[in-house]
Image: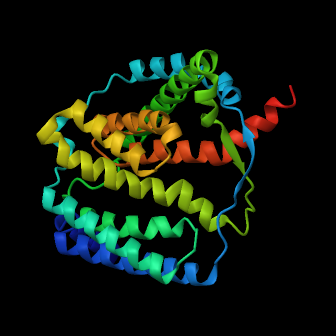
Amino acid sequence: MREKKRDSEEEENHPPTRDDHDSALGKIVLVTWTFGLVYLASHPAAPPQGGERIPAGEIARWGVALLPLGALLLWKSGRRAVPGTIPLVALREIVMACITGLIVLLIMNVVFHGQLSYMMTALPQWAAAAMLIRKFPVEKGLWPPDRAAWISDVRDVLAFVMIAVGLLSAIVMGGMFFQPDMFRAADLSVLRWHWREDMVEIALAVVAIPWLEEVLFRAGLMGYLLPRTGRAAAVLLSAALFSFMHMQGEIFWARGIAGVAMGMLYLRTGRIFAPFLLHALFNSGIMLVAPWLHNLSTRF
């Protein structure tokens, strides 16, 4: 007991250093990359393809009611961002992250040509994100520092997810009335998942890729843009590039709105956790919840 107490006191007196940070990051990179490469070599199957399409109007019917609830929750929260909590990123770090990610992407497409696993997206993103994470201030970190901050961040995420879903639903309902052909592209494909076989793919799409993209687009890109363009432009530009990089022009506007919500959450909290959780909820909603709502609506 005394030894444990002595160890905890030493940890308090000697907080994590940059060397500790880099060492831990290196170990995580090594383990995840080893797992990723082994997985790609042993699982050649592609993610499930879309089957039946869910009309966007069906989802909008359920989602539009969330808009006032989210606005009320956000108003009750009443918290504002603290400017000094956002770690800033230099242009050199952005360039190095982009070059690293592109090189890894090219190599993987040569080695694993034709492989359509989400791992093909996650590993290049992880290579780029690792270049940024190693430059983040150790004392600020990426996650809420205490229980109160966790509760506050989760409350903000719930408010923003309701506002974003409600706003998207309202736009879809209005668009379906005035321009039905244009908004028909917003219909969702129902993915046929096999939970045991596709467990890694689901984890990548719902957890790993959202976290990596938030590190790249919010912590990285916004960290570079904020002192140069101001808050509004940083949020809008990062959201636009985030949507553009997914190369789905028919829903560029929808993904852009989601990107704006994630950027605002990053400004509001100063941490990656909140926009990551929002991103993960969006992905899980599209992949898992939307099919459930579709099945539910067909019964009534």
**Residue displayed at 55% across by 57% down:** 205
Q: Nearer the viewer, residue 81 or 183?
A: 183
Q: Is residue 200 left or right of residue 50?
A: left
- Res. 154 in view: yes
- Give x and y (percent) for residue 282: 54, 42
Using the image, determine if residue 220 lies above or below residue 200: above
Q: Nearer the viewer, residue 73 or 249?
A: 249
Q: What number of labels is visible?
A: 0
- Give x and y (percent) for residue 127: 34, 70
Q: Farthest residue toward the front?
A: 181
Q: Nearer the viewer, residue 158 or 42?
A: 42
- Give x and y (percent) for residue 207: 51, 56
Q: Is residue 227 left or right of residue 286?
A: left
- Res. 28 in view: no
Quadrant holding the N terminus = bottom left
**Residue displayed at 50% across by 33% down:** 161
Using the image, determine if residue 113 lies above or below residue 226: below
- The quadrant holding residue 125 is bottom left
Using the image, determine if residue 15 lies above or below residue 219: below
- The quadrant holding residue 298 is top right
Quadrant holding the C terminus = top right
**Residue displayed at 60% across by 35% down:** 186
Q: Is residue 228 left or right of residue 156?
A: left
Colour scheme used in the picture? rainbow
Q: Nearer the viewer, residue 207 or 145?
A: 207
Q: Is residue 154 left or right of residue 46?
A: left
- Give x and y (percent) for residue 223: 21, 48
Q: Farthest residue toward the right?
A: 299
**Residue displayed at 63% across by 15% down:** 177
